Amino acid sequence: MADAMAPPARQMGAIAWLRKHFFNTWYDAIFSIIFAVLIFWGLQALIGWAFVNAIWRVENKNQCTHDAGACWAVIESRGRLILFGLYPYEEQWRSTLACFAVIITIALSCLPRFWSIRRLPLLWVVGFGAFVLLMRGGFAGLPLVTSEKWGGLSLTIFIFSGVFVIGMPLAVVFALARRSSLPVIAKSTGFFIDIVRSLPLLTILFAAAVIVPLLVPEWLQGSKLMRVVVAFAVFFAAYQAEIIRAGLQSTPDGQAEAASALGMPYWSLVVDILLPQAFRNTLPSTINQAVITFKETSIVTIIGFFEVMASGNAAIGTGEWGNQYIEVYVFLALIYFVFVFGLSRYGAWLEKRMRLGHA
Amino acid sequence: MHKPAISIISLEKHYGDFHALKNVNLEVPDGQTLVICGPSGSGKSTLIRCMNGLESYTSGDIDVLGMAVGDNTQVLDQVRKRVGMVFQNFNLFPHLTNLENCVLPQIRSLGRDRGAATEEAQEQLKKMQVNIHAAKFPDQLSGGQQQRVALARALCLKPEIMLFDEPTSALDPEMISEVLDVMQDLARADMTIVCVTHEMGFARAVADRVILMAAGEIVEEGTPVQMFNNPLHDITREFMKVVN
Ligand SMILES: Nc1ncnc2c1ncn2[C@@H]1O[C@H](COP(=O)(O)OP(=O)(O)O)[C@@H](O)[C@H]1O
Ligand SMILES: [Mg+2]
């Protein structure tokens, strides 16, 4: 009896599995072998370079001979420059704390339990406030560090989250305005979005950094960093607005009709019914947009901000560690990878969760 | 004299060049059940959607519970709080649990606090016999169950009038009766009901009056018995043959 009820064997056996997936036909076999050799060869070279033959510590930099393997000593020596940019050495603990404040804020706002119209803004005001206060100082005995001196990873994270936090509500407003029943509003918003999307990001940031101060009275200018973040946010919003609009359009008319028939006010229809569904339906594109934005933050280098990429360049640019540029770029790539990969995994998790019906 | 719950005078509706409603006159007394039937495209949905302002109209007068249904959005808000509607496709909010589907509208349109709203929602879901599904999401339910959640959602606002637009047309045959049963209970409990349906069993059981529409006009109206047994018009006779 018990035998008859046993499920069929699920394990195919390693050989059978290999056969089925890699050696099904003669050309499968050829490609499998070629790629296996390539992968093996690449991995072996990488591991040899990064670990086996690597030099981890040196007494002085001349001991870094470039041929055998990586010389990770450069990271130890220049890591602080990469992470903190020009931020004053003795105050770098503040930058670290500020960084953690924003990372924790980002992590918390990824949790569905914080997704309410009251909690999310509160969380961001606290998290951002902590970041700015810590970075800037100028109170309670903390020396003042103006935003021109902010740099490295904390600047990258600040710009990214600033763009996201300002850009997302802006995108919602743009998307709603473009769908407005008043043609004047719909048309002019559409026109504005198309203009912004047809300009290179660099041009927009340059205008914000250099041209705005010539046109706008001083009290309205804010700091250069502020202007750049806002301009970047507008750029982000123009793209994200189109994603949200697509999401709104994919929500059936019946949803709005049901809400109206139940006497729910317009704002509630938008906030409680349409937007959550629009975000749900467009989650993959939204995550994609976030990833692109994170990587694009490196563009602010050009207008004189030492975000993590520029700091990395500066770390090797002095000549002293000029031979170790590969190590530095690998380190930078790892930093980007951690964030971007984290974002994509989070997106995948959310999607799965929403397919199950939650949130 | 009792004022009618709904009174419609000389209603005209155009979609561009298309004349969708032609001189419709209609009164629904308080507590009555009115069934609207007629071939597809005859303007039944348009008419019923005019009653709570989901559809605008070209000319005429619509008075619901003493309020003039028109362009005034404040009046419309008041009307919709007192007039419930159930749709062919349920139109539940898919991102909210069935319970939350019933709770949120109470909070947003009546300003009830969450505690009271939840209590009311539980009670209505129980009456519709879907309370065990409260924590699930709409797409985890069968069509018949979804429609009963939709009905519970509308009833949570304690409406004085219920509008139904083909509430069972999207259902598998074996689920139709579970929805009709709860609607019949409502009708017997003296709710004012306007229902677009082809379920003549329902009309026979609880309708006080049946009207037949064709090409945007009310062709004939009468008690269910009259309409089924002695129709005056050929169109009605034809139609009754098809649906019975
Ligand atoms: N939004 C609209 N625009 C143009 N024509 C419409 C629209 N809605 C309905 N109609 C037309 O009005 C007529 C009546 O529609 P409807 O009231 O939905 O009919 P029923 O519910 O009786 O099947 C149909 O011919 C339909 O094509
Ligand atoms: Mg219809």
Image (cartoon, grey):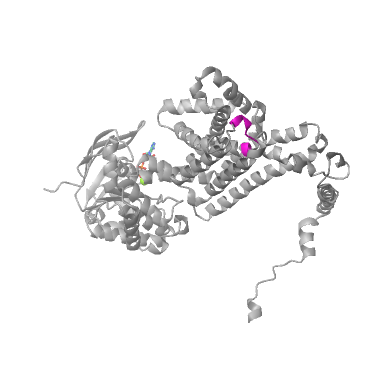
Q: Residue furthest bottom?
A: A1
Res. A284 in view: no
Res. A89 in view: yes
- Left or right of B14 on screen, residue A179: right
What secondary structure is the stretch in magenta mostly built from?
helix
Q: Position of residue B160 (x, y in %)?
A: 24, 51
Residue at 39% from the left image edge and 57% from the top image edge: B99
- B226 or A190: nearer the viewer: A190
- A333 or A234: nearer the viewer: A333
Residue at 30% from the left image edge and 58% from the top image edge: B183
Q: Position of residue B42 (x, y in %)?
A: 33, 43
Q: Position of residue A134 (x, y in %)?
A: 56, 39
Q: Position of residue B231 (x, y in %)?
A: 24, 51
- Left or right of B116 on screen, residue B67: left
Magenta segment:
A146-156
Is B78 located above or below residue A302 in the figure? below
Verify whether residue B87 appears in magenta: no
Is B233 located above or below residue B130 in the figure? above
Residue at 30% from the left image edge and 48% from the top image edge: B110
